Amino acid sequence: MDKRRIGRFRVAGNIVLRETAVAQDLFRNVVVLEASHKPWSDEFHYVAIHPDFDECDFGEEPPEYCARVDLVEVEGGRKMQFAKWEPRGAI
């Protein structure tokens, strides 16, 4: 069987639309295969390929991931910074 590094993840609308630096880091090396917006929760849902995702067999449901975003101290306050992808439930 052919294995692919495919995963599912959700991103809050405010990250995609307002935190552009975080969104750029988040989507680095991501190939989006499917995307949808859920207006009732203001979340974007994605199915994508990323080198950090675990391999899964063709036809297997892709696992779900969470982006770990850290708050870092900067001059004048704090800012969000993308850290890494982790399997959902590991955070």
Image (cartoon, rainbow, N blue to C red):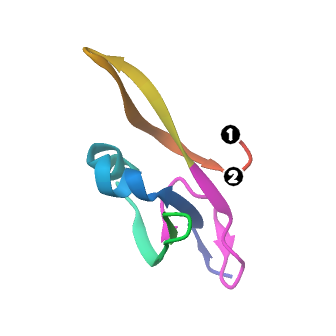
The three-letter code of the residue at mark 1 reads: Ile
Check disc 2: other Cα within 10 Å, few if <14, some if 14-19, many if 20+.
few
Residue under the image location 34 percent in, 47 percent down: 25
Query: In this picture, is 40 found above or below 20?
Result: below
What are the residue bounds of the magenta stretch?
48-66
From the viewer's side, name the closer residue of 87 and 44.
44
Going by the image, does 59 lie left or right of 32?
right
The label number, if any, that marks residue 91 in the structure image: 1
- Of residues 29 and 46, the one nearer the viewer is 46
Q: Is residue 78 visible?
A: yes
Q: For the residue labelled by badge 1, is the local secondary structure a helix, a strand or a loop?
A: loop
- Whether residue 27 is visible here, answered yes or no, is no
Is 7 colored magenta in this rendering? no
Q: Are the residues flagged by discs 1 and 2 in contact, CB closer than 8 Å?
A: yes
For numbered disc 2, what is the local secondary structure?
Answer: loop
Q: CA distance from mark 1 to mark 2?
A: 7 Å
Q: Position of residue 45 (x, y in %)?
A: 52, 69
Residue pictured at 31% horizontal, 57% vertical: 17
Residue 26 lies, with reference to residue 3, above or below; the image says above
Q: Residue at x 50, y 63 (%)?
A: 43
Label 1: how many residues lie within 10 Å, few (<14), some (14-19) or many (20+)?
Answer: few
Which quadrant does the N terminus fall into? Answer: bottom right
Q: Nearer the viewer, residue 86 or 56?
A: 86
In the image, which disc is placed on residue 88?
2
Q: Is residue 40 left or right of residue 59?
A: left
The quadrant the C terminus occupies is top right
Please give the count of numbered marks on the rendered protein: 2
